[in-house]
Amino acid sequence: MSLESKAIEDINRALENDDTQAAASISQTYLRDLDSIPLNIAVTGESGSGKSSFVNAFRGIDNRDDRAAPTGVGETTMKPKAYPHPIYPKVTVWDLPGIGTTKFPAHQYLKHIGFEKFDFFIIVSSDRLRENDFKLAQEIMKMGKNFYFVRAKIDSNLLSAEKSQKEYDEEKTLQKIRENCIQGLEERGVTAPQVFLVSNFDLHLYDFPTLQETIERDLPSHKRDTLILALPNICSSNIKKKKEVLRSQIKFHAFTSATVAALPIPGLSIAADLGLQ
C-alpha cells in the first residue's frame, strides 16, 4: 500500500469515528513526511566520462553555476561529493570517484562509498565501457540495487561518426552503439543490462526520457513522486507528471486547512494555513 493510500485509509477511519482532530493530524503528518523523503542518487564513472556534467544536468544546473559539480579536463573526483537539488534539498545527486581513481577492488569500493544509502546507481562512460564498469555492475547486482548504464557525450560520438562514415544514418548509429554496449555487458554476466545514450547538454534528445521513465518505474511510489518533482523540465510530459503529483497533494492541503478551521482550538487554523504557504 502506498503512503497516500495508507493516509487516506487512516483519515477515513478517523472520520468514521468522528475524530476530526485525528484526521487533520494524519493529513498534516502525511504532508510533512512527503517533504522529508530522501532520494540519494549515485553517479560514478572514470575521469573524463562526462560524469560531473551529468550530475549537473540531472539537477537542472548549468556547468558554470556556482552550485555545479566541477567539470573539465583533469578534474578527478577522489571521494564522494554530495550535490543537493537546488529546489528539493532532500534529493541528492552524489558524484562518486570512479573505481580507477581508488585503490579498492569493486566489492570493497561499494563498502568504501557507503552503498547502503543510495537508492540506485548510474554508471557513466563516454565511449566503450571499461572493465571496472563491468566489475562494479556485477557487485551492485549482488547487493540487490538497481543500476543504469549511461553513455554520455553521445552527441560527440555521433558527430565523429558523421564525419567518418560515407553513408551516415543517425538512428542506425545509435542502435549499433547501444547494441555493442549491451552485448559487452551480457558477455560479462550482467543480466538484462539497461543502457541509455545521453547528451548532457540536450537531455530531451536520445535516451534520457527513457532513462527517467525506467527509474520512475523501478522506484517505490513515494520516492517516484520525489524524483518526478526534482527532474528538469525537458519536455511537456515531465511538466504533466509534476502537475499530477502536485494535484494529488492538493486534496490533503485543502482537507487539512478546512478541517482545522472547523476545530474549536484558538490559533490552530492559522497555524495550519501558515504551514501550507
Image: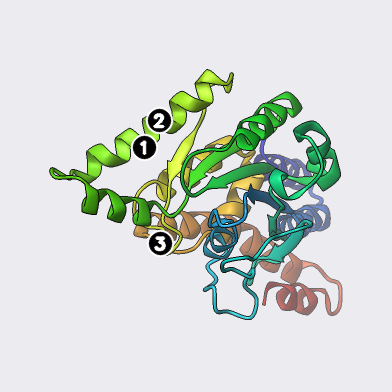
Reading the image, the residue beneath label 3 is 234
Q: Evaluate if marks 3 and 1 touch, with contact meaning CB atoms under 8 Å apart.
A: no
Reading the image, the residue beneath label 2 is 180
Q: Residue at x 76, y 79 (%)?
A: 270
Q: Residue at x 38, y 62 (%)?
A: 202
Is 7 in front, or is 146? Answer: 146
Q: Evaluate if marks 2 and 1 touch, with contact meaning CB atoms under 8 Å apart.
A: yes
> Where residue 176 appears, x then y in whole percent?
32, 34
> Where residue 51 appears, x then y in whole percent?
58, 56
Determine the CA span between mark 3 and mark 2. Answer: 28 Å
Give the quarter of the figure containing the C terminus: bottom right
Is residue 131 placed above or below 72 in the rendered structure? above
Q: Nearer the viewer, mark 3 or mark 2?
A: 2
Three-letter residue code for mark 3: Ile
Q: Residue at x 68, y 57 (%)?
A: 95
Three-letter residue code for mark 1: Ile
Give the quarter of the figure containing the N terminus: top right
Dot 3 or dot 2: first in sequence order is 2
Is 169 in front, or is 40? Answer: 169
